[in-house]
Image (cartoon, rainbow, N blue to C red):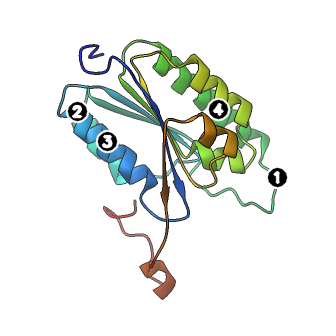
């Protein structure tokens, strides 16, 4: 942990219905690495083999990514399975432990807002993370549907707004760009 650089850490939220929230957080992790800062990224609801996993291996020990999800999607019309809830809760505990460990300068709770939307994590649990954040640690919550109380508690909130997207023309997610 680089205490000289981050004397005061803040809480950031990247939300909205457009692409780029996780990418922004990973960009911040990459920038931080250039200054000797260490980032832990806990990915909620993700179990797929995204390109950033291999990239993070190349960036050790500066960027660590762990996933807390299956390689399938959770659908809003169905209640979450107990297994999905347990994976999210275990992930929350792991990410929170990383935040309190003194080993990392930045903790990214990737897709935690979406995990909240799908009833895997409560807003109270998210607020508890914010309350227990050490002074010298930056915390970032990403994902669509950030709860209003988390937005209120955050220091910086960015909303990604879709103006135009090639998915509308049937372009699938591309390796190296969206995954």
For mark 1, what is the residue? 79
First in residue order: circle 3 vs circle 2 = 3
Residue tagged by mark 3?
A: 28
Q: Nearer the viewer, residue 161 or 82?
A: 161
Q: Residue at x 55, y 51 (%)?
A: 143
> Which residue position holds label 2?
33
Label ID, residue 126: 4
Label 4 CA crowd tier, 10 Å (few <14, some 14–19, many 20+):
many
Could you tell me residue 78's position as x and y percent? 81, 58
Q: Are marks 4 and 3 in contact (CB under 8 Å)?
A: no
Disc 3 from disc 1: Cα separation: 34 Å
Q: Nearer the observer, disc 2 or disc 1?
A: 2
Q: How many marks?
A: 4
* Residue drawn at the location 73% of the way across and 38% of the way down: 85
**Mark closer to the observer (3, 1):** 3
How far is disc 1 from disc 4 in space, using C-alphas? Answer: 20 Å
Instruction: Using a 10 Å C-alpha cutoff, classify the residue at mark 2 as few (fewer than 14 neighbours), some (14 to 19) or many (20 or more).
Output: some
| Figure quadrant of residue 82 | top right
Q: Gap in Å between the C-alphas at discs 2 and 1? A: 39 Å
> Quick one: label 2 or label 1, which is nearer the N terminus?
2
Say if residue 13 shows up in the picture: yes
Q: Residue at x 62, y 48 (%)?
A: 146
Q: SS for tag 1?
A: loop
- Specify the label residue 119 is tagged with: none
Image quarter of the C terminus: bottom left
Could you classify mark 3 by the number of other residues whose Cα lies within 10 Å: few (under 14), some (14-19), or many (20 or more)? some
Residue 146 lies, with reference to residue 83, above or below; the image says: below
Secondary structure type for disc 3: helix
Tell me if mark 1 has few (under 14), some (14-19) or many (20+) residues whose alpha carbon lies within 10 angstroms of its own.
few
């Amino acid at each position: 942990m680089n205490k000289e650089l981050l004397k005061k850490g803040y809480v950031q939220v990247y939300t909205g219905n457009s692409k780029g929230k996780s990418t922004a957080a990973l960009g911040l992790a990459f920038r931080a690495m250039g200054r000797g800062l260490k980032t832990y990224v806990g990915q909620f609801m993700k179990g797929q083999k995204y390109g950033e996993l291999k990239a993070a291996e190349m960036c050790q020990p500066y960027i660590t990514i762990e996933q807390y999800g299956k390689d399938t999607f959770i659908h809003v019309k169905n209640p979450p399975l107990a297994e999905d809830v347990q994976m999210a809760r275990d992930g929350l505990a792991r990410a929170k432990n990383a935040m309190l460990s003194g080993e990392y300068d930045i903790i990214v709770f990737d897709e935690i807002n979406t995990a909240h939307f799908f009833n895997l994590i409560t807003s109270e649990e998210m607020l508890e993370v914010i309350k227990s954040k050490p002074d010298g640690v930056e915390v970032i919550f990403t994902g669509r549907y950030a709860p209003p109380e988390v937005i209120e508690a955050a220091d910086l909130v960015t909303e990604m707004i879709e103006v135009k997207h090639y998915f509308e023309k049937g372009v699938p997610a591309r390796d190296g760009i969206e995954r």
